[in-house]
Image: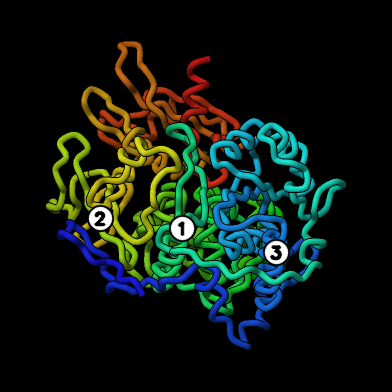
Amino acid sequence: MIAAGISREKPVFQSPFPPIEIPDQSIYDYLFGSLDDTDLERIALVDPASGAETTYGALRAQVDAFAGALAARGAGVGTVVAVLCPNVPAFATVFHGILRLGATVTTINSLYTAREIGGQLRDAAATWLVTVSPLLLQAAEAARAVGIPDDRVIVLDGAEGHPDLRSLLGEGRTPPEVSIDPATHVAVLPYSSGTTGAPKGVMLSHRNLVANVHQCRPIIEIVPDDRVLAVLPFFHIYGMTVLLNLALRQRATLVTMPRFDLAEFLRIIQDQRCTFLFIAPPIAVALAKHPAVADYDLSSVHSVFSGAAPLDGETAETAGRRIGARFYQGYGMSELSPVSHAIPVGGGMPVSSVGVLIPGCEAKLVDPETGAELEEHGDDGLTAPGEIWVRGPNVMLGYLNRPDATAETLDDDGFLHTGDIGVHHVDGYFTIVDRLKELIKYHGYQIAPAELEALLLSHPQIRDAAVIGVRGDDGEEIPKAFVVAAPESGLSADEVMAFVAAEVAPHKKVRRVEFIDVVPKSTSGKILRKDLRAREAV
């Protein structure tokens, strides 16, 4: 066992939870090594489209067989296998089969074009690609571009000229014995979203993955009887760790959903009696405001956990009241495997916060301009805003082939500089203010877009909103709101600006408004501000 939470020097903020011991295991051994006879019969995965169920015993057998089939074809430690696949039960088989083999998985966004897929394959040095037939056109084009032959492009549901999952599992091969160092061996290579820069491969070790699940277990209370709706993509680190790995470790049942569609999302919750939802803020907005929610029985849901982007408290509380569930929020990033903060069950803290540091994590708040560590709380119980620095066993090894970017993000003391601005409350919880690079500077004042977005979402006639900084007539940066108005609301730009002006200090006022049909967002729920800025450039 490896101790977590031991400091070389005392940082400003510690987790309120006691230090924990991180098991010195591979992620396969951690998740599947302790399955008992009762666990083997539990349902691990449900495909709501077909009704097919996979037990934990069957899943482990499939993982072993897939690892054996790949090993027989020459894959092993040092091999990088790309997975381009939506949320289907087979994802768990191939993902953990690759890791069981000692190979490395790089997960690819299912919405990527052939060019984007090829770019990641090339950067990650992947020599195998696993996909599904609906994505084969772009997958095959990308594979050809980087020299991956057809016999190394596995099409899970079958396609002529390619291996398929049924055939590979049918070989019944035994997985090889593998010896790796969990602390240094790269298990997964998710790529950063690219919303603030070029995508980079985030090197996460087996220990990183094990640590983050182990850290989350005491604070995100999933139990074996839970039925967890897996709508957030497994290819994203949030879905990979908090849905796939945490739910499996807790022996819960995962109900997979390949893509988000609101009506289908609501129907699956109702028909499958899902109890625990992990979502991103856009789904919370829909739960709070969309009229279709009233047409479904969501009474089985007891908890909803939001992450991937800031969620305003009013939206969370409205959604929670509407469906009769507890709402929680957390914080993290790919480089943190991904969770560093979460609201504990019964924590008694506002849902607008991201909660407390999880066990084994410690943090600093640093003034981005002076470098001073911020620890004094004001009369309102809050520190001044600062960049959040985090240290713990879940911090990445670094960026693949990018020592320069690694050095900019990860300091010599092991603190990851998140680029997110937050405040700390005297009661121990954190609230995210905004991204460091997204702060708007208006006549020397800093304005957080997330604060204005939360306020705009509280307007009953606004369905969604995003705020960026644009140049005003005098050359100064000013806040501009992109607003999705309720149908037939007749809402005007002047009304939006007056609404905000009545609630904020003068320097924070929205000074331009544009109505749009949809706010562009990544699959993990982050507002794509670069797309909004591109509209400005046209």
- Which residue position holds label 2? 363
Query: Label 2's element?
Result: strand
Question: Looking at the picture, which amino acid does disc 2 mark?
Answer: Ala
Residue at image location 59% in from the left, 51% down from the top: 79
In the depicted view, which residue is nearer to us: 477 or 332?
332
The reply, left or right, for residue 226 in relation to residue 135 is left
- Which residue position holds label 3? 66
Q: Of the residues tagged 2 and 3, which is closer to the observer?
A: 3
The quarter of the picture where residue 254 lies is bottom right
In the depicted view, which residue is nearer to us: 253 or 451?
253
Q: Position of residue 216 (x, y in %)?
A: 42, 67
Query: Label 1's element?
Result: loop
Name the quarter where the N terminus is drawn. bottom left
Q: Position of residue 31 (x, y in %)?
A: 54, 72
Q: CA distance from mark 2 to mark 3?
A: 40 Å
Q: CA distance from mark 3 to mark 1?
A: 20 Å
Residue at image location 74% in from the left, 72% down from the top: 53
Is the residue marked by circle 3 packed among few (<14), some (14-19), or many (20+) residues within 10 Å? Answer: many
Residue at image location 54% in from the left, 65% down from the top: 245
Q: Position of residue 372 (x, y in %)?
A: 14, 43
In the depicted view, which residue is nearer to us: 33 or 375?
33
Q: Position of residue 492 (x, y in %)?
A: 50, 27
Query: Does the CB distance between marks 2 and 1 fall below 8 Å?
Result: no
The reply, left or right, for residue 463 in relation to residue 311 is right
